[in-house]
Amino acid sequence: MNYVKQGELGVVTASIGPKEDNPRNSEGTFLELQDGEIIFVYSRFRGDSSHDEAFADLSLIRSTDGGRTWGEDEIILTYQGEDGVNMMSPALLMMNNGDVGLFYLVRLTYKRTQIFLRRSSDKGKTWGERVVCTPQEDFFVMNNDRVVRLASGRIIVPVASHRTGDNYMDGRSLAMFFYSDDDGATWKCARDKCAMPYSSFCYSGLQEPGVLELAPGILWGWARTDLGNQYEMFSMDEGDSWTACQPSRFTSPNSPLSMRRDSDGTIYAVWNPIPIYNGRFEAWEPVTGGRFPLVIAASRDNGKTFSHPTIVEGDETRGYCYTAILFTKDAMLLAYCAGNKEDGHCLTRTRIRRIEKSQLEEFCTGAWLNRR
């Protein structure tokens, strides 16, 4: 696979790094409010540990100028208030009545997690009572910025399900899908679960799934694996039943892929492809997890073909992952983890990057390539 390289795609408008008693800031999500203000919610860890199971709250920052600048962070929900040991992986969604919907994962115990929804009618300043979106006991993993609303109004929450026991968690997860047809008031589990057919050769299963609607009721699902590719599956009935999974065109380490459709119909994919060269800096592998470069590609034919990947971030001493995507009138906002050895590891720092749509057009939809 050939990559298109460039000097700088967009500009970094925020870098939320670790500091004393705040060892990690990661996995965020955007929402543009009705008055044009943009909010960004992310996982803010506290104490001295940045591990996934460590103490974490949810924090919020605001922008009133299209993501060019950001205000001070404010903690909006705490893990103690959720009666858990940890909370993370938020996803924001505009609800039908104009409320802000906030989906998030709570680690209730070290062997049980749940996904919850809270609503805010005052732009995220206060939050109502939580609703359980996963009405069964399990160890679920939901990525940030994954919740989608379909053309019918149905809300889909894709999750990975891991078997757990005493001092045991099976890394080989199943992909599952929960849905609501009443704007988040009640939730059901889809009929099908998706499993990796090559379980004897795979240690990941289908982890951290995502969903994109290709046409009304027709869904494209994907999940990360340790087999060198994202695996994909499709649903023709709004996510209730799914095809068997298969390797997709997206090569990657065991790292998440994000896709989102702009208002003009263009689909943008952001991910870590497997590099075209051999020999990485082995000393950096525990820090980056092999999650570089971070690239972006565009499709104008509903996912049939994509442009050549364009490098967004290519510093091999950093790892880039857990991307959130927002389209404004004139720009794309990307938020992603971007830590290095000095930060501790790749998950401890979050960057927000603003890319003008004119530059996206130039680099991701063919104009730049044609000029070469």
Image (cartoon, grey):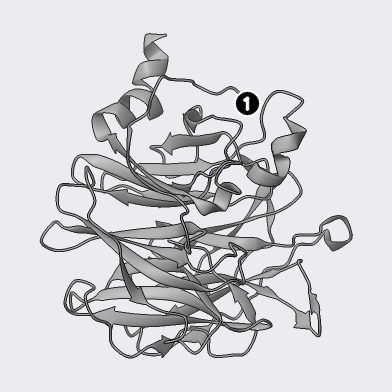
| Residue 212 shows in this picture | no
Residue 203 visible (yes or no): yes
Q: In this view, does 35 lie above or below 310?
A: below
Question: In this picture, is 195 found above or below 255?
Answer: below
State left or right for residue 7 relative to residue 207: left
Q: Nearer the viewer, residue 181 or 185?
A: 185
In the rendered image, the vertical position of residue 292 relative to residue 7, given as above or below: below
Identify the image quadrant of residue 38: bottom left
Instruction: Say left or right for 42 vs 66.
Output: right
Image coordinates of residue 356 in percent, x first then y, are 26, 34
**Of helix, strand and loop, which one carries label 1?**
loop
Near mark 1 (Cα within 10 A), the count class, few <14, some 14-19 or many ≥20, is few
The residue lying furthest to the top in this view is 372
Between 247 and 3, the one nearer to me in the picture: 3
The kind of residue on which mark 1 rests is: Met
Image position, residue 140 (x, y; %): 61, 76
Going by the image, does 276 lie left or right of 299?
A: right
Classify residue 281 by image quadrant. top right
Tell me the quarter of the picture where residue 289 sits.
top right
Residue at the left extreme of this rendering: 35
Residue 83 appears at what percent x and percent y?
A: 49, 90
The residue closer to the viewer here, 132 or 68, is 68
Question: How far across and down, in percent of the image, does residue 110 sit?
Answer: 67, 81
Assign the C terminus to one quadrant of the image: top left
Q: Residue at x 39, y 14 (%)?
A: 370
Determine the residue located farthest toward the right in the rendered image. 200
What residue is drawn where x is 81% and y is 59%? Answer: 203
Q: Which residue is drawn at 19% across and 71% down?
A: 123
Residue position for label 1: 1
Quarter of the image with the N terminus in it: top right
Viewer-closest of 77 and 323: 77
